[in-house]
């Protein structure tokens, strides 16, 4: 297995957000994960919506879309996005150009 080939590894943590129950909007950050159980070095995200999303690892009220330079494109799986995510950090999302209120956002963290 070569370095960076995360698609064949098993995630150390996986989270699913039902966006019909918990919409992701342009107005506010949605905290998909209160605190990552494990640390990781990459994430892969399935965004089935029609809107790109932005991501933050900042605490509630301290989210910042400039921390991570990633825009999660709509319409499928993207990544892996390489960055260190320490255990205990939150993971939040915000819609970029339209509120999202359907589909399931899936986040896989790789160690």
Image (spheres, rainbow, N blue to C red):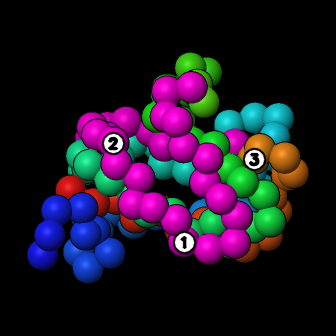
Disc 1/disc 3 C-alpha distance (Å): 16 Å
Residue 79 visible in this rendered orientation of the protein: yes
Which sits in the foreground, 100 or 6?
A: 6
Q: At numbered mark 2, what does the secondary structure look like: helix, strand or loop? A: strand
Disc 3/disc 2 C-alpha distance (Å): 21 Å
| Residue hosting label 1 | 77
Q: At 32% from the left edge and 75% from the top edge, which residue is drawn? A: 7
Taking the view exactly as shown, the residue that stands out farthest to the left is 1
Location of residue 64 in the rendering, given as x and y in whole percent from the top left corner: 58, 25
Whether the residues at callouts 2 and 1 have beta carbons within 8 Å, the answer is no
Q: At 63% from the left edge and 66% from the top edge, which residue is drawn? A: 47
| Residue hosting label 2 | 83
Disc 2/disc 1 C-alpha distance (Å): 17 Å
Q: At 49% from the left edge and 34% from the top edge, which residue is drawn? A: 68
- Mark 2 residue crowding within 10 angstroms, few (<14) / some (14–19) / many (20+): few
Q: Is residue 91 above or below residue 75?
A: above
Q: Which mark is residue 95?
A: 3
Quarter in which the C terminus is drawn: bottom left
Q: Is residue 66 above or below residue 104?
A: above
Location of residue 108 in the rendering, given as x and y in whole percent from the top left corner: 40, 64
Q: Residue 75 colored magenta? A: yes
| Boundaries of the magenta span | 66-94
Location of residue 30 in the rendering, given as x and y in whole percent from the top left corner: 66, 43
Task: Indicate left or right for 10 with 26 as reference.
Answer: left
Taking the view exactly as shown, the residue that stands out farthest to the bottom is 8
Quarter in which the N terminus is drawn: bottom left
Question: Could you tell which of marks 3 and 2 lies nearer the N-terminus?
Answer: 2
Question: Could you tell which of marks 1 and 3 lies nearer the N-terminus?
Answer: 1
Q: At numbered mark 3, what does the secondary structure look like: helix, strand or loop? A: strand
């Amino acid at each position: 297995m070569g370095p960076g080939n995360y698609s064949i590894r098993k995630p150390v943590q996986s989270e699913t957000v039902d966006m019909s129950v918990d919409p992701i909007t342009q107005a506010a950050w949605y905290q998909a994960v209160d605190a990552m159980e494990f640390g990781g070095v990459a994430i892969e995200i399935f965004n089935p919506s029609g809107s790109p999303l932005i991501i933050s690892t900042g605490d509630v009220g301290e989210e910042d879309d400039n921390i991570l330079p990633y825009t999660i494109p709509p319409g499928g799986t993207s990544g892996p996005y390489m960055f260190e995510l320490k255990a205990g950090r939150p993971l939040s999302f915000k819609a970029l150009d339209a509120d999202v209120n359907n589909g399931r956002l899936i986040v896989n963290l790789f160690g």
